[in-house]
């Protein structure tokens, strides 16, 4: 991907960023699978592990700023995504929900970090993997709680519905549980990260190109840079929100699997 402040012109013509800028070559020619998003997904996992291990290592009654930051994030996930949604069974799922939230958040924020400037989940395959894992957990919990026969029956034949309606409803419910939910969960995260990063590239690269033009265009270029900076702060809010929404929906689906009827 072209760096945000690199030249983006071909001759005197502005070449706008597109989906091609999200297809990155390998970092090393001899290692075809090691691209920038793959590398930084591993970096995100390491950073999350190191941060929370360090913040909990010297825990004290009066927490340090480092410990307080770790406890603040954990307390947020525990309260808003654990106890309020999963009730008394939340402890079993806290390691997964906490890891999921912090991992997505870290990867999203990479999109506005200088010299990284690429949100991992703007590549849809990464979002699909998280969606598959989330629904593997959800279906596993439901099968363990309800039993195979009851779980499948409740999905295919919703209680209290007239039998003729099942002709239409059953295929919809099967598609919803097996395809639509994991697909929309993944696409929501991907689409927001992709669109947000594309907008930032457009304003910053466009602004850089306009600064090379006439005086009037230089003024517009400064405005474009200003808009890009404002959108960077907005993108940070979207990045946090998308990490929250993905984890929230995962918790809700798990809660549905734990319910007697789902």
Image (cartoon, grey):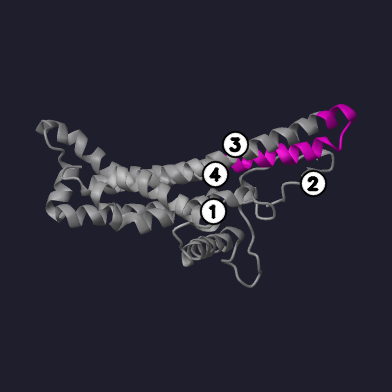
Residue 18 coordinates in the image, percent (x, y): 64, 43
Q: Is residue 126 visible?
A: no
Which dot, 3 or 4, sits closer to the camera?
3
| Magenta-span inclusion, residue 255 | no
Residue displayed at 64% across by 36% down? 231
Q: Mark 1 or mark 2, which is nearer the start of the sequence?
A: 2
Residue placed under numbered mark 2 in the picture: 7
Residue placed under numbered mark 4 in the picture: 193
Residue placed under numbered mark 3 in the picture: 234
Q: Quadrant of the C terminus?
A: top left
Q: Mark 4 or mark 3, which is nearer the start of the sequence?
A: 4
Q: Mark 3 or mark 2, which is nearer the start of the sequence?
A: 2
Residue 218 coordinates in the image, percent (x, y): 85, 32
Q: CA distance from mark 3 to mark 1?
A: 16 Å
155 versus 216 height, above or below? below
Q: CA distance from mark 2 to mark 3?
A: 25 Å
CB under 8 Å between discs 2 and 1: no
Which dot, 4 or 1, sits closer to the camera?
1
**Which of the pair 115/210 is nearer the observer?**
115
Residue 107: numbered disc: 1
Which dot, 2 or 3, sits closer to the camera?
3
Q: Mark 4 or mark 2, which is nearer the start of the sequence?
A: 2
Residue 141 coordinates in the image, percent (x, y): 24, 55
| Residue 177 appears left or right of 196 | left
| Residues rendered magenta in the picture | 194-219
CB under 8 Å between discs 4 and 1: no
Q: CA distance from mark 4 to mark 1?
A: 10 Å
Q: CA distance from mark 2 to mark 1?
A: 26 Å
Residue displayed at 48% across by 67% down? 57
Q: Mark 1 or mark 4, which is nearer the start of the sequence?
A: 1
Mark 2 Cα within 10 Å, few/some/many (few <14, many 20+)? some
């Amino acid at each position: 991907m072209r760096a945000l402040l690199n030249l983006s012109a071909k001759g005197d013509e502005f070449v706008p960023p597109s989906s091609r800028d999200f297809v990155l070559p390998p970092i090393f020619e001899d290692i075809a699978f090691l691209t920038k998003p793959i590398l930084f997904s591993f970096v995100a996992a390491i950073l999350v592990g190191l941060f929370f291990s360090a913040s909990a290592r010297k825990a004290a009654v009066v927490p340090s700023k480092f410990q307080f930051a770790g406890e603040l994030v954990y307390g947020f996930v525990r309260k808003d995504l654990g106890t309020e949604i999963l009730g008394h069974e939340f402890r079993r799922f806290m390691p997964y929900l906490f890891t999921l939230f912090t991992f997505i958040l870290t990867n999203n924020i990479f999109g506005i970090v200088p010299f990284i400037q690429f949100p991992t989940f703007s590549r849809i395959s990464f979002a699909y993997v998280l969606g598959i894992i989330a629904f593997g957990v959800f279906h596993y919990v439901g099968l363990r709680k309800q039993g195979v026969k009851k779980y499948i029956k409740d999905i295919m034949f919703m209680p209290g519905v007239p039998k003729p309606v099942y002709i239409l409803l059953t295929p919809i419910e099967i598609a919803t549980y097996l395809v639509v939910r994991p697909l929309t969960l993944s696409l929501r995260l991907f689409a927001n990260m992709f669109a947000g990063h594309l907008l930032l590239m457009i304003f910053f690269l466009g602004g850089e190109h306009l600064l090379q033009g006439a005086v009037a265009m230089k003024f517009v270029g400064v405005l474009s840079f200003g808009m890009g900076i404002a959108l960077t702060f907005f993108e940070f809010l979207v990045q946090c929100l998308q990490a929250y929404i993905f984890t929230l929906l995962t918790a809700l689906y798990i809660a549905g699997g734990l319910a007697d009827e789902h």
